[in-house]
Amino acid sequence: MITFPKGREIYIRPGATDMRKAVNGLSLLIQERMEMNSLSGNYYIFCNRRRNLMKILYYDKNGYSLWYKRLEEHRFPWPDDESSARKLTKEEAVWLLKGIDFFNAHKELKYKTV
């Protein structure tokens, strides 16, 4: 299991990504489509259309690292919205890798009076 160190941000790219892309293609996608810096050391998570493949790209000290996970059964929970990248907490990223669908979790209700 991949670990996410403190001080690094984690971004998810909603919608489907072409998983034929390797380090260069994904870093270009980060810079052009997500309008972020792929050399920042932050983690960027991508998923394919079938939602059974996931790639995580990050820059680590002296080069890129690419982490790849393929599910034999089931699917990753994944947002369809093709809008801008969404920032995840470290906890949400771990949940995502475990298959927990926090995207459709109950929202907290706030009341002014009882």
Image (cartoon, rainbow, N blue to C red):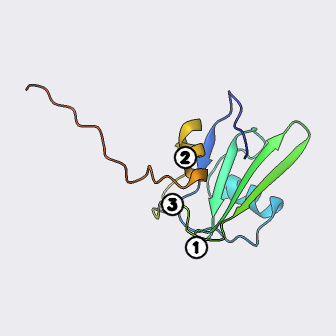
Q: Secondary structure at mark 1?
A: loop
Q: Secondary structure at mark 3?
A: loop
Residue 66 visible in the shown view? yes
Report the residue marked by disc 2: 95
Report the residue marked by disc 3: 78
Name the foreground residue: 97 vs 33: 97
> Comparing marks 2 and 3, which lies closer to the viewer?
2
Distance of label 2 from label 3 (alpha carbons): 12 Å
N-term mark: 3 or 1: 1
Q: Amino acid at mark 2?
A: Trp
N-term mark: 2 or 3: 3
Q: Amino acid at mark 1?
A: Arg
User: Of all residues shown, which one is farthest toward the top?
Assistant: 113
Distance of label 3 from label 1 (alpha carbons): 10 Å
Taking 20 as reference, is 61 left or right?
right
User: Of all residues shown, which one is farthest toward the right?
Assistant: 62
- What residue is at 64 percent from the left and 59 percent from the top? 46
Taking 114 as reference, is 21 left or right?
right
Q: Are marks 2 and 1 in contact (CB under 8 Å)?
A: no
Name the foreground residue: 2 vs 55: 2
The circle drawn on residue 60 is none
Packing grade of label 2 (10 A; few <14, some 14-19, many >=20) is some
Taking 57 as reference, is 61 left or right?
right
- What residue is at 48 percent from the left and 58 percent from the top? 83
> Can you give x and y, in whole percent of width and height, for residue 72 in the image?
66, 71
The circle drawn on residue 49 is 1
